[in-house]
Image: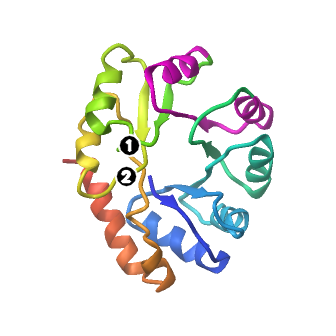
Amino acid sequence: MPVLVVREAADAAPLAKALIAGGLPALEVTLRTPAALDVIAAMAEIPGGVVGAGTLVTPQDVRAAKAAGAEFGVSPGATDALTEACLEEDLPLLPGAATASEAMRLLERGYTTQKFFPAEASGGAPALKAIGAPLPQIRFCPTGGISLSNARDYLGLSNVLCAGGSWVAPDALVSAQAWDEITTLAREAKRLLSV
């Protein structure tokens, strides 16, 4: 899943089209730039994609993301206020967990799909494999330090549903509006799932 930090709303539609053409229709737009909500709104209009809001931290983030057209949310961690806001707004959430205890707390709330963040700083694929042994009912989307060179380590784990990263749409290529190159990177990332 592409983790997108988009600085210009004008780049939203062509970026979404490039990623979808490359086989990556689930798009996480992080709320890290002033343009993020406008980017979500623009990407929500592109056929074939599903746009979500990343870096949800507060209930206000949840409400703003939902109003902008986000179809799912992603958070670096999880608080009661955040999860309650997602329930109130009917916004599916991929909540973040970095430890077995955090994962178990989220499991108690019904979250069987979680984000493992920050993946590399939290022990990488070996740590996620270890967490999966006692918690096989949880599937993870690791993010944080994932790249083309290590994504396969994660995707080979039985408890990994997908992996997220910004390498498929790096700032330099987005700034250069190199949409064909981004489509190529998306195709490379998509191929990792079939290997």
Magenta stretch: dominant SS? helix
Identify which residue is drawn at 59% across, 78% down: 11
- In reply to whether residue 49 is colored magenta, the answer given is no
Q: Earlier in the sequence, mark 2 or mark 1?
A: 1
Secondary structure under the numbered disc 1 in the rendered image = loop
For residue 9, above or below residue 86: below
Q: Give the range drawn in magenta.
A: 81-108
Nearer the observer, 44 or 166: 166
Residue 71 x, y percent position in the rendering: 65, 47
Quick check: marks 2 and 1 in contact, CB under 8 Å? yes
Q: Position of residue 163 (x, y in %)?
A: 38, 46
Label 2 CA crowd tier, 10 Å (few <14, some 14–19, many 20+): some
Which residue does the image show at 44% across and 52% down from the upper left?
Answer: 1
Mark 1 lies on residue: 121
Looking at the picture, tell me which residue is in the foreground, 103 or 70: 103
The scheme the figure's colours follow is: rainbow
Amino acid found under the numbered disc labelled 2: Gly
Image position of 123 with respect to 39: above or below = above
* Amino acid type of the residue tagged 1 in the rendering: Ala
Q: In which quarter of the image is residue 189?
A: bottom left
Please rate how many residues cluster around mark 1, counting C-alpha atoms within 10 Å: few if below 14, some from 14 to 19, many from 20: few
| Residue holding disc 2 | 145
106 is higher (above) or lower (below) than 78: above
Q: Which element type, helix, strand or loop, lies under badge 2?
A: loop
